[in-house]
Image (cartoon, helix red, strand yellow):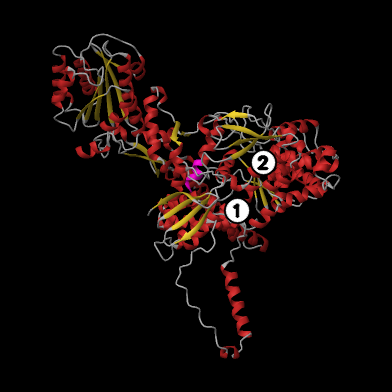
Amino acid sequence: MAHLIDRRQNAPNKSAVNRARFLRRYKQQIKRAVHDMVAERSITDMDRGGDVSVPRKDISEPVFRHGAGGDREIVHPGNREFVKGDRIPRPEGGGGGGGREPGTGESEDSFVFALSREEFLQIFFEDLELPRLERNMLGGIEESKPQRAGYTMSGSPTNLAIVRTMRTSLARRIALGRPLVQELEELNAELARAIAEDRPQAEVEALESRIEELKRRLQRVPFLDEFDLRYRNRVNVPEPTARAVMFCLMDVSASMDEAKKDLAKRFFTLLYLFLTRKYEHVDLVFVRHTDNAEEVDEKTFFYDRKSGGTVVLSALQLMSEIVAARYATGGWNIYAAQASDGDAFGADAGKSARFLSERILPLTRYFAYLETPDEAGARMSSLWVEYQEISAAPDTFAMRRVTRRDEIYPVFRDLFRKDVGAQAA
Amino acid sequence: MSLISTGADWDFELIERYERAISACARDFNLDTYANQIEVISSEQMLDAYASAGLPVGYPHWTYGKEFIRNEQSYRKGYQALAYEIVINSDPCIAYLMEENTMMMQALVIAHASFGHNSFFKGNYLFRQWTEADAIIDYLVFARRYVMECEERYGEAEVEAIIDSCHALSLHGVDRFKRPQPPSAREERARLEARKEYEQRQFNDLWRTIPGREPTHSTGKKRDFPAEPEENILYFVEKHSPRLEPWQRELVRIVRKLAQYFYPQVQTKVMNEGWATFWHYNLINRLYDKRLVNDGFMLEFLQSHTNVVCQRGFDEHGFGGINPYALGFAMFTDLRRICEKPTAEDRHWFPELAGADWLKSLDFAMRNFKDESFIGQFLSPKLMREFHFFAVADHESESELFIDAIHDEGGYRRVRKLLSEQYKRENSVPDIQVVRYERDGDRSLTLRHFEARNRPLKGEEAEEVMKHLSRLWGFTVRLESVDPAGTTKDTLECAR
């Protein structure tokens, strides 16, 4: 008779520990693969896991085996037309005889496997930290969170804890009534005996009146007393959260062609993913500008088309207005990232740079400027030249030029390196 | 008799009833098995089991993670279906059934694993000689605990490095000819006690007075060590490595023991799967003959069965070499046919089988052969024709490949011999042995690769393996490739 066991309830994931070891061992290769993936992907796809491929030779485990060369015979099934002595040209690569179908399934030289979304983002954002975020700063009053804290004797009727109240009531009634009930029972027994023994009338009457009095006293114990009432108690506990607001400024003028916009979009997408992942309380403000600036929602910011001239200053002005209106300093850490091809006309560049250094930078903890020139070797744009003068204050301002998709990720990492914050702090 | 069940759903009671019914059929055929333990698992658990080569317990190592990821990936993508079962050579014999299987599938799997494989494990000489079915699970538990303790004490990286190196050599950590029987510490002590007691009883002071022989002076010539080449490299490392710590030796031993455990499985793939397939086919058919299952069940069964024993031609899409299920099933079925309805050809080729009792003949074949000898002995011309076997020769000196032999009158013996050799272990695992250990010199270790038919080693990979070996050995290691004439063709040295 066989022994039948249902193992389905046992935890599956027995291999989780081995899987984790594998990922840890090939971290370098996996990181590289994630990096390539970021460069390849479209923005909407960024926020999910993906297939990572690692060179097979990196992870193969060597054993002694035969190489090409020497003599051998191989037996195959399915002969149709061959007879003894037929000669067949050697297949490419000099490998064994007969024909193996070329790779069905995964390719021979890379090991492909899926990273979950969590794993992907973990590797993606590793070592990155939003610069100079002061985590210890307490948020505003609305950041406190009510928390249960037992029961109180007073409170509003909506908070009445009925079960708890009834329990106290019951306890009180028992406590006050028990000795009386007991005495009453004794007296009743005494009375019964007195009647049976035919004692004097006076004694019987005394007992009866005593019983009456006890009964009245018992009735006077109230069902519910004010003393019984219990209310649920809540206290407000302040939550130490660091709040931040991130301004995304982008030039969408005619000179920003699709490729450049794509670069900028990527930069912001990374930023967006990074923020939404890392911090729970982060506000995002999207400001796009041509010759005038407007605040838009995320979708419009990334996917809506608009063209026109370029006035960088308008965006900076709008940003400072929004800050003044909604994010008065103190409660908020303000960060901003600006993307532009740097084509600014006339006095705009100079004015923008001045406005930035005088009005914006004092407000913000960090300002990153990403320039997307036509080609890597292009001459410096007017905005770049002007901005360069500000970069004398390097701990709050950073600027980079990017021309290719796959440069975005390193720049992003570079700009938001952990140690930027460490140095500045 | 009435049907056991209809429909695809299964429950535990039905599984038990099928198991009893199949067990009754198996008794009709005199199948001798270990006790059965049947465990129902989910597909995730099946993937876990895959990663650890089917063993229920294993030590933690990244390579199992890799295996897991690989299987999971191809399963998720639909490249590969999961096996319907995994069976472990242990006593009791543990078979895993997937919960996704239909009732028919569960019955098939019980017949295949719990009776087919099980009886093979119990009967075949390789398994009888080389593995201890009753001890393997305990050993695995011990190994896992030991490895984890080492990780705690010496760090994961250290342990991983040693195990990596051992894995690289695990194919050469197998005793092929002598049965490994390490006496346990207790047995060893008991043996010493017994010996002392014997000496005491036999003590006679007289012997002391007899003049002893002059001690022979050593000739001064250093003897080679080891005296005979040692083919079990991991064993040699474990016993003689000058550098390894005791715990590292124990790790080497663990990997070696596991490699040894899998040694018979690799050599009996065709037979083992063929035997199990043959029996599931016959047992289920017997259920049908007894009217315990209906036509729907049989149609579903036959479809699965034909999928399992499908053999594609070398030039067809999806060809993945010779299917061991197909070849093994065909051979056992053919054996039965030869016994029951021999043709003139069979009488000529297998005079001792034609007309013999088929149950006894099959049982004999199952017990006493491995793939290589089984094919060499029992592959009939009829099967070679059915499979359209042909042999391609690839000789270094020739510019083209040529057809060595095909399934015709002149080629039967040649094809059979070549196919049999194809299943020889030496065909896939190069013959490499330890030949010299400079005990009194620089402590270097020399391996020798005995090249068969001029087939060289794969260079870069061999180098990697040598690096692993030098990590285990701690001193310089050398690999000489020697051709059959005895001249050294190539030397690979990995200094430390």
Q: Is residue A204 left or right of residue A113?
A: right
Dot 1 alpha-carbon crowd within 10 angstroms: few under 14, some 14 to 19, many 20 or more: some
Q: In the image shown, does A334 or B143 lie closer to the viewer?
A: B143
Q: Is mark 2 on a helix, strand or loop?
A: helix
Q: Which residue is outermost to the top?
A: A308
1 and 2 marks on the same chain: yes
Residue hosting label 1: B261
Q: Residue B80 in the image: x percent, y percent? A: 59, 33
Q: In this view, does A389 lie above or below B158?
A: above
Mark 1 or mark 2, which has the lower sequence index? 1
Residue B23: numbered disc: none
Q: Residue B130 occupies which quadrant of the picture? A: bottom right
The structure residue drawn at horizontal position 64% and vertical position 62%, both measured from the top left corner, is A193
Q: In this view, does B164 lie to the left or right of A362?
A: right
For the question of whether residue B110 can be seen, the reply is no
Q: What residue type is labelled 1?
A: Tyr
Q: In this view, does B149 lie above or below A57?
A: below
Residue hosting label 2: B419
Magenta-highlighted residues? B61-66
Q: Which amino acid does label 2 sit on?
A: Leu
Q: Which chain carries label 1?
A: B
Q: Is mark 1 on a helix, strand or loop?
A: helix
Q: Distance between the residues labelled 1 and 2?
A: 25 Å
Q: In this view, does A52 lie to the left or right of B264?
A: left
